[in-house]
């Protein structure tokens, strides 16, 4: 792609942000079209199925592109989360309260901000988020379990973020989940 070779670092970062915003806008347009045609329940089911497919794909591509080792635990997850498309457009924070826990917070969300500007209720993304976050994390390392701490439509416990997710390492010997994937 010779045209990309001529871009400055600043222009490349602008292009990256624009592509991430366009991806997010397309996701929203697709969802609205599905909702208009099929209703909210069916659109949510299709969205969940799409994220079930996309999240592992995104995780694998990030791991390949940035040499993040599979099975690398929470350290690998922390690195991978920073390269997600969301990280380009939504401010996020990662906390490590101990060696076995990672807390991921989406500080602001373009989707929810747009809905609020339009006077709409928050989009109830928790059911899809449960699939998205668990599939992404388990692709990085099958021993990682996820738990929703807060996500719309929940009322926030932490007003400093839109949603928060806890990731922990499964410590039992067989590697079986110590709790169900969607234990929110």
Image: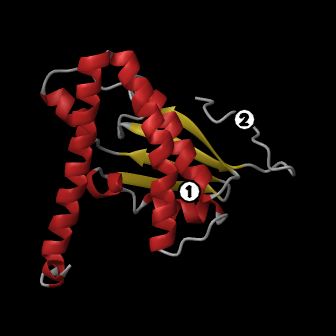
Residue 148 or residue 138, whichever sits in front: 138
- Name the quadrant containing residue 179: top right
Rendered-image quadrant of the N terminus: bottom left
Q: Is residue 90 above or below residue 16?
A: above
Residue 117 or residue 175, whichever sits in front: 175
Q: Is residue 8 above or below residue 155?
A: below
Q: Position of residue 22 (x, y in %)?
A: 19, 50
Task: Determine whether, in the image, residue 172 is placed left or right of residue 64.
Answer: right
Q: Position of residue 143 (x, y in %)?
A: 71, 52
Residue 92 or residue 35, whichever sits in front: 35
**Residue occupying the point 20% across, 28% down:** 115
For mark 1, does the 10 Å Cα neighbourhood hold few (<14), some (14 to 19), or many (20 or more) residues? some
For mark 2, does the 10 Å Cα neighbourhood hold few (<14), some (14 to 19), or many (20 or more) residues? few
Which residue has dot 2 on it? Answer: 179
Task: Determine whether, in the image, residue 181 is placed left or right of residue 23.
Answer: right
Can residue 173 be spotted in the picture? yes
* Element under disc 1: strand
Among all residues in the image, which is located at the extreme right? 173
Rendered-image quadrant of the C terminus: top right
**Residue occupying the point 34% across, 55% down:** 85
- Name the quadrant containing residue 68: bottom right
Q: Position of residue 137 (x, y in %)?
A: 57, 51
What is the spatial separation of the Cα atoms under label 2 and label 1, in whole angstroms? Answer: 20 Å
User: What colour scheme governs how the chains and residues are painted in the rendered image of this protein?
Assistant: secondary structure
Between marks 2 and 1 in the image, the one whose residue lies nearer the viewer? 2
**Residue occupying the point 50% across, 40% down:** 52
Task: Determine whether, in the image, residue 174 is placed left or right of residue 180.
Answer: right
Q: Which mark is residue 96?
A: 1
Q: Position of residue 41 (x, y in %)?
A: 39, 17
* Element under disc 2: loop
Q: Earlier in the sequence, mark 2 or mark 1?
A: 1
């Amino acid at each position: 792609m010779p045209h990309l070779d001529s871009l400055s670092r600043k222009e490349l970062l602008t292009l990256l942000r624009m592509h991430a915003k366009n991806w997010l806008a397309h996701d929203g347009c697709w969802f609205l079209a599905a909702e208009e045609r099929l209703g909210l329940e069916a659109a949510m089911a299709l969205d969940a199925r799409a994220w079930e497919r996309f999240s592992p794909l995104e995780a694998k591509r990030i791991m390949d592109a940035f040499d993040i080792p599979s099975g690398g635990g929470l350290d690998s997850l922390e690195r991978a989360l920073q390269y997600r498309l969301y990280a380009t457009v939504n401010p996020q924070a990662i906390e490590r309260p101990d060696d076995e826990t990672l807390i991921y917070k989406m500080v602001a969300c373009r989707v929810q901000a747009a809905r609020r500007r339009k006077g709409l209720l928050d989009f109830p993304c928790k059911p899809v988020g449960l699939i998205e976050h668990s599939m992404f994390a388990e692709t990085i390392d099958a021993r990682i379990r996820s738990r929703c701490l807060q996500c719309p439509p929940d009322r926030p416990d932490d007003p400093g973020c839109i949603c928060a997710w806890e990731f922990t390492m499964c410590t039992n010997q067989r590697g079986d989940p110590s709790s169900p994937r969607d234990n929110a």
